Amino acid sequence: MLFTRQAIIAAAVLGCFSGLSAAQSSLTFFGFVNSAYVKKIGEDIQRLDEGAQSRWGVRGKEDLGGGMNAFFALESRFKSDSGEQNGIRVFQGQSILGMEGPWGKVSLGRDYVAGYIEAQLLADPFIHTGVASMVAIGTGGIGTVRSDGTITYMYKGEGWNISAQRANAVNPGTNTVNFAIPNHPVSVGASYRSGRYYAAFSYDNPGGLNDSWQFATLHAPLGPATLTAGYGSGQAEDKSKRRSYMVGAFLPVGPGVFKISYGDLSNTSSHLSMVRKYAVGYNHSLSKRTFLFLNVARDERVLKNNAGYDMGIQHNF
């Protein structure tokens, strides 16, 4: 069997997988390192930190014949300024094992929430990274990004995709519950892409007694720019109603990409705006894998130090 350079590096770094690598049809070592000078919203200090969480991981796939494959994915997060692991979990980002075939794909383990990947993430031109992140707008402060013990089914057609997921009810799967949740979190998502047009919808029941969240995303071209929009609504665990919306755009400019976004999250039961955020940024590509970035953001609902920025460099591998 012929190994790529990435596979050899992965086997060297992950010695515990050295016996497994020979059985793989493919093995890929991946990730990125992000380092930035940062002032976070709500803080008055400036320091060398990270604009986005640096990460490394390994993916593998084995051909089982008959159009079927076994696969796994492991992803770890770390802090580039100190080299520390981000959180107590080694594979904080993802830890899944599964099988795929003409009938679709099934995976088991710690994974991204299905509706988050389909709709909530892609409404944000900054894809929920750094000071410009609109993650609270996408999730409504109700849903979450990942869940433990998931069973996920995904099927891809010609331009469209559907996914459904059920997770363990042992650990909190919702941003509005701080104790063990009583129900299994459930998430479904559907999307369709045609060229630069993209539409998606998600529904999440994060596992509390009362919480739920739905979100829709749309991308549409306008000349060289791509416009983005998102709208969400739902109910928190305390039965308060929430609504969010977001608009943005990304535009190729020379060797880079210019990005802009605005988002709002409100508690409509109390007529209170929880987040009202503006963000603008630019990524300047030095190569296919390396770029410089500068992002500036402001949240009008933060009472003190409501503006922030991050500027730095990211290398993908």
Image (spheres, rainbow, N blue to C red):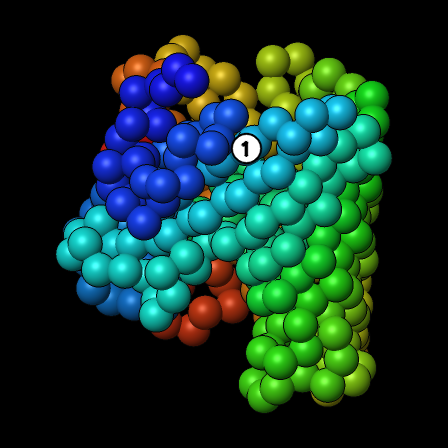
Image height of 99 relative to 88, above or below: above
The one nearer the camera, 297 or 95, is 95
Q: Which residue sits at x=60%, y=13%?
A: 224
Q: Residue at x 24, y 66 (%)?
A: 44
For the C terminus, give its image quadrant: top left
Instruction: Please report the residue visible at 61 percent of the width from the left and 27 percent of the height from the top.
Output: 63
Could you say where residue 70 lies in the image, as x and y percent from the top left? 62, 38
Q: Amino acid at mark 1?
A: Lys
Q: Quadrant of the N terminus?
A: top left
Position above or below: 317 against 47 = above
Residue 237 makes an appearance in the image: no
Front residue of this view, candidates 195 and 154: 154
Q: Dot 1 corresponds to which residue?
A: 61
Where is residue 188 drawn, in percent x and y? 80, 54
Q: In the rendered view, does 260 fall on the left or right side of 149? A: left
Place of residue 232 in the rendered image (x, y in percent of width and height, measured from the top left) = 76, 57
In the picture, residue 144 is in which quadrant?
Answer: bottom right
Whole-percent x, y for residue 254 in the image = 40, 11
Residue lying at 27% horizontally and 45% vertically, measured from the top left: 15
In terms of secondary structure, where does tag 1 sit?
Answer: strand
